[in-house]
Amino acid sequence: MRGKVIVISAPSGSGKTTIVKYLLSEFPELIFSVSATTRKPRKGETHGKEYFFISEEEFKKKIEENQFVEWEKFYDYYYGTLRDYVDKNLDEGKFVVLELDVKGALNIKKQYPDAELIFIAPPSIEELKKRLIQRNTETEEDFKKRIERAEMEMSYKDKFDYVVINDNLDEAKQNAKKIIENIIRGG
Ligand code: ADP
Ligand code: 5GP
């Protein structure tokens, strides 16, 4: 049986990576779709694990060769979902998890109509700022761009199939877990 695409979106700093890592550790049925990006790796990130870190030139070549299911440019960087990676895993019957921005998520639904879209929301923009400051991985300029974008992204949340509010992390993890169980069971 062909697998299914599960898209997880959230404004940067909402806790999406933290929750996705937890879900991947809980469910062997899930596989993370590694996107390509032109941004530089953060401390602890590895090529081929969080992203395929490639040059702008390589990225543009892949666009021309139609290797992306969807791609977006924001914060001066390109991000794209690799078509072969997704389709190969779907053919193997896996549940493929895509961590995308909101526009990428809605784009995916057009191409994979049975995709399940999950939105992770921070309790407030103030809390989001705090988390990004605490994570301390962005320059001042990138931080500002991410906050500006967060408000726009929040306005998309009603277009998603599920919304998880990440206030208390343990509760958010359990809520996300229930959603995934439901999707895997075909509910
Ligand atoms: P994203 O992938 O959405 O950008 P991260 O998973 O990197 O977000 O989380 C941003 C920061 O907030 C990280 O430092 C993470 O440890 C922290 N964080 C995540 N969830 C919570 C929470 N519920 N309460 C407090 N801090 C959190
Ligand atoms: P970050 O730089 O924090 O890893 O990611 C920035 C944003 O890019 C996040 O919203 C993340 O979900 C999104 N993103 C990562 N990969 C892709 C992708 O392949 N396509 C799209 N559209 N967005 C992506």
Image (cartoon, rainbow, N blue to C red):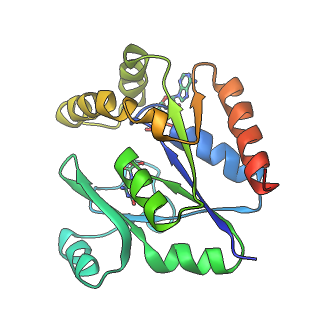
Position of 172 relative to 47 (above/below): above
Farthest residue, direction right? 185
Quarter that holds the N terminus: bottom right
- Residue at 55% across / 78% down in the picture? 87
Q: In front: 112, or 7?
A: 112
Q: Is residue 172 left or right of residue 38?
A: right
Q: Is residue 45 left or right of residue 53?
A: right
Q: Residue 52: x, y in percent?
A: 40, 68
Farthest residue, direction bottom? 65
The number of numbered discs placed on residues in the rendered structure image is 0
Q: In front: 53, or 102?
A: 102
- Residue at 39% across / 45% down in the picture? 102
Q: Residue 108: x, y in percent?
A: 45, 60
Position of 140 relative to 51 (above/below): above
Q: Residue 120: x, y in percent?
A: 53, 34
Name the image quarter holding residue 142: top left
Q: Is residue 28 left or right of residue 156?
A: right
Q: Is residue 14 left or right of residue 21?
A: left
Q: Residue 80: x, y in percent?
A: 35, 64
